[in-house]
Image (spheres, rainbow, N blue to C red):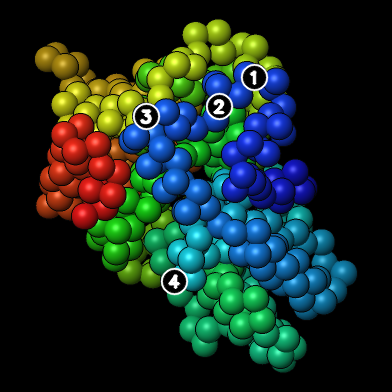
């Protein structure tokens, strides 16, 4: 099924060793962190301090393998896969207790087959089945008593049902969901960008830490996934990163269930398809990405990220995407136009899904930030960000830019 997605990104904390493993045979000066300039040296040191240790990665891996064996025991002969996603796979996990949990999804091959065949089950049945399966896992883990302790309550969120599990043996917090088909592909996409250009990986970790420092409550901040997409879009515009999805001409469609909840109650849902193809062969990417900027230093790019979102990006005017060129599409309608660029994208891509299309078009007018998910067009991962929060982000962008440009002080961006 999705076994190729299971392998996490492991970057060695020794940058010299990482260069030796460089699959593209690029000269080290093109990917190693420059240390001649003071600010670049600070970035290099901060980056190394943020990366998970080998022991932390081993613990997460061991916890995942243990949980997978537990679920195989619980479900017996049923065809299942436990697939990790999130920062463990993308390589953007931060060091420290509770900084990066393990996200996993339990996939049922029978469910995937039913989706493809448009089985008689309704989408609401799938939602109920998700909760039922989490209850089975919950009870099974309680009886096994092997250090994987499930929470008593299953959380019902806008993203579906979630069972939180604490692995006391390895000190890992796990979030388990059922049949999250697209999320592993998102993580694999980000992993590929991380492997392609070391500068992206450095910036992504630093901005993730920056985000958590300034906005410690996850309910009042832009989520880490969205910050990463914003960074990718900016680096694509600077020709540092390519458009991996546009590099693959052949489609790779997967079927998945999408249902919309409000207050935990089912509203509507569909069985949908998404093209998850992207180029993950780094040699091909390097060969085809002819206009690549190899010269911009990581400090220039960090300064540029803040400058761009302060001076050129307008959240009222632009929606962000990374799947194809023109990263910043127009949200507002031009004079005489019936639809904006963003509305045209939603109308075209969601024409078969009437309720979802109407919901997106109606709500988008009130969204402060719009990000078009790489694979799930009907999802804006930034939809919960309100104007006061975005204003605070702009304020922190200004303060950080001042610390970098006037003081050459990386630690100043975290104050």
Residue position marked by numbered label 3 in the rendering: 37
Q: Is residue 390 visible?
A: no
Q: Secondary structure at mark 4?
A: strand
Q: Nearer the viewer, mark 3 or mark 2?
A: 3
- Residue closer to the observer: 247 or 290: 290
Residue position marked by numbered label 2 in the rendering: 31
Q: Nearer the viewer, mark 4 or mark 2?
A: 2
Are the residues tagged 3 and 2 within 8 Å (C-beta)?
A: no
Q: What numbered label is drawn on residue 194?
A: none
Q: What numbered label is drawn on residue 156?
A: 4
> Badge 3, how many Cα within 10 Å: few under 14, some, many 20+?
few
- Residue closer to the observer: 406 or 115: 406
- Residue closer to the observer: 228 or 259: 228
Specify the quadrant of the image occupied by residue 66: bottom right
Residue found at the far top of this picture: 290
Residue drawn 25% across the image and 23% down it: 330
Are the residues tagged 1 and 2 within 8 Å (C-beta)?
A: yes
Q: CA distance from mark 1 to mark 3?
A: 22 Å
First in sequence: mark 3 or mark 2? 2
Q: Secondary structure at mark 3?
A: loop
Are the residues tagged 1 and 4 within 8 Å (C-beta)?
A: no
- Residue 193 position, x and y percent, is 55, 32
Residue position marked by numbered label 1 in the rendering: 26
Residue drawn 55% across the image and 21% down it: 30
First in sequence: mark 3 or mark 4? 3
- Residue 204 position, x and y percent, is 43, 42
Residue drawn 73% across the image and 86% down it: 146
């Amino acid at each position: 099924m999705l076994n190729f997605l299971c392998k996490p990104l492991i970057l060695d904390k020794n940058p010299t060793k990482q260069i030796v493993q460089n699959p593209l045979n690029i000269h080290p000066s093109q990917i190693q962190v420059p240390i001649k300039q003071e600010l670049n040296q600070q970035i290099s040191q901060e980056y190394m301090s943020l990366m998970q240790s080998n022991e932390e990665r081993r613990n997460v891996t061991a916890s995942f393998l243990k949980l997978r064996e537990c679920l195989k025991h619980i479900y017996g002969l049923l065809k299942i896969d436990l697939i990790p996603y999130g920062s463990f796979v993308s390589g953007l996990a931060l060091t420290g207790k509770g900084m990066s949990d393990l996200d996993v999804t339990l996939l049922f091959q029978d469910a995937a087959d039913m989706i493809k065949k448009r089985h008689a089950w309704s989408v609401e049945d799938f939602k109920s089945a998700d909760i039922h399966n989490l209850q089975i896992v919950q009870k099974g883990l309680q009886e096994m008593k092997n250090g994987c302790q499930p929470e008593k309550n299953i959380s019902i969120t806008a993203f579906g049902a979630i069972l939180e599990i604490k692995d006391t043996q390895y000190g890992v917090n796990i979030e388990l969901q059922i049949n999250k088909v697209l999320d592993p592909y998102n993580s694999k996409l980000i992993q590929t960008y991380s492997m392609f250009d070391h500068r992206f990986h450095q910036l992504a970790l630093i901005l993730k830490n920056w985000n958590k420092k300034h906005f410690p409550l996850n309910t009042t901040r832009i989520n880490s996934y969205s910050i990463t997409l914003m960074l990718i879009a900016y680096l694509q515009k600077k020709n540092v990163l390519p458009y991996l999805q546009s590099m693959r001409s052949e489609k790779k469609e997967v079927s998945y269930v999408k249902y919309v909840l409000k207050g935990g109650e089912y509203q509507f849902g569909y069985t949908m398809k998404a093209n998850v193809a992207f180029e993950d062969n780094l040699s091909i990417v390097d060969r085809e990405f002819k206009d690549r900027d190899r010269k911009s230093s990581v400090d220039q790019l960090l300064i540029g990220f803040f400058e761009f979102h302060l001076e050129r990006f307008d959240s009222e005017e632009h929606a962000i995407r990374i799947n194809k060129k023109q990263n910043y599409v127009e949200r507002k309608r031009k004079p005489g136009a019936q639809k904006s660029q963003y509305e045209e994208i939603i109308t075209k891509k969601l024409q078969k899904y009437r309720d979802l299309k109407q919901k997106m078009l109606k709500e988008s007018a009130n969204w402060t930030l719009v990000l078009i998910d790489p694979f799930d067009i009907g999802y804006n991962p930034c939809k919960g960000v309100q104007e006061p929060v975005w204003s605070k982000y702009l304020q922190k962008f200004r303060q950080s830019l001042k610390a970098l440009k006037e003081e050459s002080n990386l630690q100043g961006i975290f104050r």
